[in-house]
Image: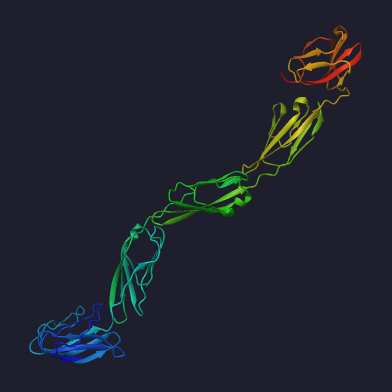
């Protein structure tokens, strides 16, 4: 520091808001120069006004530069530092002494930033550039303030939208500020519609009403971008957590999940006496289950685990179907076939030299017999025997025999010629 009456002294403005006077404003002006350790000039400035101004002493520390001297200028540059500090704004007359203080620092660069997407419900991760030895002060909407370099605002909402200001103060007392505008965008709503418990073999149906970009993921490697997803013929490996992620036009996303259970079908085993004689019992048995539903020939149905048909007849022959239902309302089905035989010593026979046709069979009300033999029908007799071997009808041969009152069952019709067995055939009477 010192003084000079030169008008072309080398000057250098360091920028960043530093004090700088590029020209001599009077006769003698104070001069200030700052060099680094390699003697490179960092700052060169006049200090004065319209008359004579002298710098007679300098003192420096890490944060301040103090210049002292005297001035005859009426317009010497002054600045009130703080409230209640001693301050004289103008020359009191003649030659006044002065004390001028400069901050011994460079104004920091300030670059406030947001490092993640500003979405409703997400955090706002604020970031400030690093300045060695500096302190930070953030201010923002909804009364936000923080002295952290990189503060985080959790669970952001629209109330956090607005201007954020960042002030960086260096250890030398210099400061600078920057502004960041943040708009918190809405996040999409992800709603999954499904049935959370299904039975093995059923379809798993996943759907959402969202019209945003969609991504499904789940067990067994499921991935899909469809709004509605169907997994047909589900297996136990399809049990687990299904995730739905939706992303809107602001690139904001949300994820929801649901657990779907695929229940195994109940175990089913059917036992039965597969072949029975007409008149004996049909016994049906199955493995244990909360609910049973049997269906079978001749209108048979039962909700018992082990139902029986005490007195069977030919109409009970056929397939028997069982469906069981467990506590998860899962069902399993199986079937078995039961044969009802006419257990009698009488066998169907045909005379090699003669034949008859008997129809219909099964029948309801009557049968018709056609004589295909060259036999005198006046000499023929007709017998009808039930499954127990009991004779029901014994009468002269005729083509039409009315049997409306006959009970349902299996019968044998025998056509005789003078007590010689010529023809026998098994026929079935159904319920009217």
Q: Is residue 58 above or below residue 281?
A: below
Which quadrant would the C terminus be assigned to in this image?
Answer: top right
Where's residue 209, x and y in %?
Answer: 45, 46
The residue drawn where x is 16% and y is 87% is 8
Say which of 310 and 240 sits in front.
240
In percent of width and height, residue 109 lies at 31, 75
- In the depicted structure, whether residue 280 falls above or below residue 88: above
Image height of 34 relative to 358, above or below: below
In terms of depth relative to the viewer, which is nearer, 331 or 354? 354
Q: From the viewer's perspective, is 331 left or right of 372?
A: left
* Horizontal side, residue 75 vs residue 328: left or right: left
Residue 135 drawn above or below residue 307 = below
Q: Quadrant of the N terminus?
A: bottom left
Residue 96 point in image, percent of width and height = 12, 89
User: On the image, which quarter does residue 21 sit in?
Assistant: bottom left
Q: Position of residue 378 (x, y in %)?
A: 86, 6
Say whether residue 315 is left or right of residue 66: right
Report which quarter residue 41 is drawn in. Answer: bottom left
Nearer to me, 217 or 136: 217
Judge left or right: residue 306 versus residue 99: right
């Amino acid at each position: 520091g010192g003084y000079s009456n030169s008008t072309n002294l080398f000057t250098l403005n360091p920028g960043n808001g530093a004090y700088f006077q590029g020209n001599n404003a009077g006769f003698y002006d104070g001069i200030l120069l700052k060099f680094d350790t390699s003697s490179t000039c960092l700052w060169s400035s006049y200090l004065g006004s319209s008359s004579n101004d002298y710098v007679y002493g300098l003192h420096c520390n890490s944060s301040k530069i103090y210049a002292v001297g005297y001035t005859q200028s009426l317009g010497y540059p002054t600045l009130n530092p703080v409230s209640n500090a001693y301050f004289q704004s103008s020359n009191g007359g003649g030659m006044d002494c002065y004390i001028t203080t400069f901050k011994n620092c460079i104004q920091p660069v300030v670059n406030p930033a947001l490092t993640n997407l500003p979405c409703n419900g997400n955090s706002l991760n604020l970031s400030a550039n690093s300045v060695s030895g500096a302190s930070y002060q953030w201010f923002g909407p909804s009364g936000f303030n923080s002295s952290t370099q990189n503060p985080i605002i959790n669970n952001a909402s629209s109330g956090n939208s607005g201007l954020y200001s960042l002030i960086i103060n260096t250890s030398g007392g210099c400061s600078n500020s920057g502004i960041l505008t943040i708009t918190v965008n809405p996040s999409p709503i992800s709603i999954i519609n499904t049935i959370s418990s299904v039975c093995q073999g059923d379809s798993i149906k996943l759907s959402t009403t969202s019209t945003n970009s969609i991504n499904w993921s789940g067990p067994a490697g499921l991935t899909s971008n469809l709004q509605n997803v169907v997994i047909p013929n589900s297996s136990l490996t399809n049990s687990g957590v299904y995730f739905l992620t939706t992303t809107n036009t602001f690139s904001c996303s949300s994820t929801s999940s649901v657990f779907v259970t695929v229940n195994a079908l109940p175990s089913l085993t059917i036992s039965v006496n597969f072949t029975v004689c007409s008149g004996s019992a049909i016994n049906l048995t199955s493995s244990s289950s909360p609910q049973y539903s049997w269906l079978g020939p001749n209108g048979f149905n039962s909700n018992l685990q082990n139902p029986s048909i005490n007195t069977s007849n030919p109409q009970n022959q056929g397939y028997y179907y069982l469906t069981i239902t467990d506590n998860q309302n899962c069902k399993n089905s199986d079937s078995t076939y039961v044969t009802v035989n006419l257990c009698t010593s009488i066998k169907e026979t045909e005379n090699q030299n003669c034949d008859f046709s008997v129809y219909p069979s099964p029948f309801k009300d009557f049968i018709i017999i056609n004589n295909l033999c060259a036999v005198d029908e006046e000499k023929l007799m007709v017998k009808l025997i039930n499954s127990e071997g009991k004779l029901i009808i014994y009468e002269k041969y005729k083509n039409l025999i009315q049997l409306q009152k006959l009970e349902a069952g299996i019968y044998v019709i025998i056509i005789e010629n003078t007590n010689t067995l010529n023809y026998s055939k098994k026929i079935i009477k159904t319920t009217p």
